[in-house]
Amino acid sequence: MKRNLWSSLVITLLLVSSAYSVKVGESAPEFQATDSNGHVQKLSGNRGKFVVLEWHNNGCPYTEKHYESRNMQRLQNEWKSKGVVWFTVISSAPGQQGYVTAQQENEYLKQMGASPTAALLDPKGDVGRLYSAKTTPHMFVVNPAGVLIYDGAIDSKPTTDQADIPSAKNYVSQALEEAIAGKPVSTPTSRPYGCSVKYGH
Amino acid sequence: MLQMLNRSIIWSLGILVASAACLVSPTPGVADQPADKYVKVELVSEQDAIVPGKDLWLGFRFDLQNEWHTYWINPGDSGEAPRIEWQLPAGFQAGAIRWPYPERLSTPPFADYGYEHQVLLMAPVRPPAQLKDGETQKIAARVRYLVCRDVCIPGQQQLELTLRVKSAAPASPAGELFRATRARLPVPAPPSWKISAASIGEEFVLDLESGKPAKTPQFLPLHAEQIENAAPQVASALPGGVRLHLKKSKHLLKPISRLEGVVVFASGNAYVVNVPVSQLGKGSHTQ
């Protein structure tokens, strides 16, 4: 019992300290998660490529804004065609909004016409907490050297209104375009906007 | 085939336009949207009439169901502040919304800033000096907002209020709520106070010197991504006040020149903070 208490304390401390270890300009932390097709995905398996992480909750109105408008699907297709790896990450705990089984997620992807490289199922919230993912969506971009180059919102208009998308500056595309052109990322962080990530307690 | 496709596109466009029109201007009072179950929003006036040329205080009263909240101007780690678009008669001018200080809504490891139960977001509206006594004026606004419990629902309302022009205005039934809300509006700190801020390593240090010791005030930042919203704000005593240690946001990559926000004391008194930040840096020689 006592040992359990100590080990959970140690785990808690590790999680707390790791919550602050993700910082733009530093190495993106390694993670491992099972995707909706049962494959294990690791960040380190994608060295040499840009990787986008998209936090997702299919019941969140901010996520719906970008999926019902097909903005997210368009971004996924555009950047995948340019060799970028796109992971959709679902950190909702069982019983919470946005939690899905592998089968439900595959049905959702099909229904929405969404095609990320993979949808990672993170019901314990380990990857989410490791990255300190706050909202859905919350976007991260990792460069081919494994360094985090963007951490923040999907774009510059923090609303649920689809009509705001065309006039918004998309920070993910901007970061990828600039980094691919060998330029520094002009907006490396922003306030992520959306619903809170529905972690378990 | 092409024709059919065209027709179906036109048909769906028609539906889209129709539904967009519904969204833009639902009939007041008959709006039917999921958010209405959890929040009621009304446009209210402090006074029962418009006096030409004299500021009139109007407000948006949010009545929230238990457990639901809406957001402050800086919503914190998630959420979104209400947005207001005035539709005023010619010659009328609205001032800025006055935001009562919010509660810190903790959802570890994050925190939001918002309001539960009831909040009034008020603003002054100045009518023109030339208005005919006895005529009526319609003031309208569109409000968009987000309400959340564990889940979030966006909503919007087209609101309006018709008031008569008079030479003197009696208080309206909402007058008391305006008075109560003013007590929650942050005010400038007394000129005798010394407030200063410094950037030291991973934190901002905010010194509040009023001449008296103060217990653990809370700093609420006006701007997002300057401090970690959920980090404990450690207070230490100063001879004539209190020092607050604020953990910098990991999203803050460049120094900030000013620290802006609200400081709330245990008494419920709230003061505006807007001070330059001196860069002391950890182990740095420069000041």
Image (cartoon, rainbow, N blue to C red):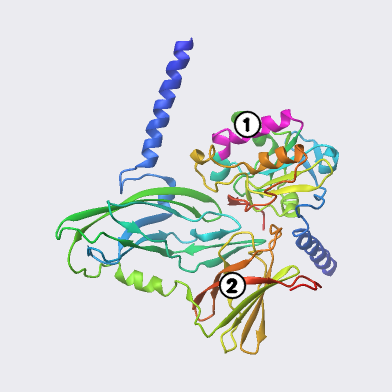
Compared to residue B195, the image places residue A37 above or below, namely above
Viewer-side residue, B205 vs B128: B128
Indicate whether residue A80 is drawn in magenta: yes
Q: Image quadrant for the C terminus of chain B?
A: bottom right
Query: Which residue appears at 47% of the width and 15% of the height?
Result: B5
Question: Please, what secondary structure does the residue beneath circle 2 have?
Answer: strand
Give the residue type at disc 2: Val
Q: Which residue is mark 1?
A: A74
Quadrant for residue A66, please give it: top right
**What residue range appears in magenta?**
A66-83
Q: Position of residue A92 (x, y in %)?
A: 65, 48
- Horizontal arrangement in the rendering, residue A48 relative to residue A167 (left or right): right
Viewer-side residue, A110 vs B230: B230
* Callout in the foreground (1, 2): 2
Q: Position of residue B63 (x, y in %)?
A: 40, 60
Compared to residue B50, the image places residue B186 above or below, namely below
Query: Which residue appears at 40% of the width and 34% of the height?
Result: B19
Most frequent secondary structure within the magenta stretch: helix
Residues packed near mark 1 inside 10 Å, few (<14), some (14 to 19) or many (20 plus): some
Quadrant for residue B246, please give it: bottom right
Chain on which label 2 sits: B
Q: Position of residue A173 (x, y in %)?
A: 67, 39
Q: Which residue is mark 2?
A: B275
Viewer-side residue, B238 vs B77: B238
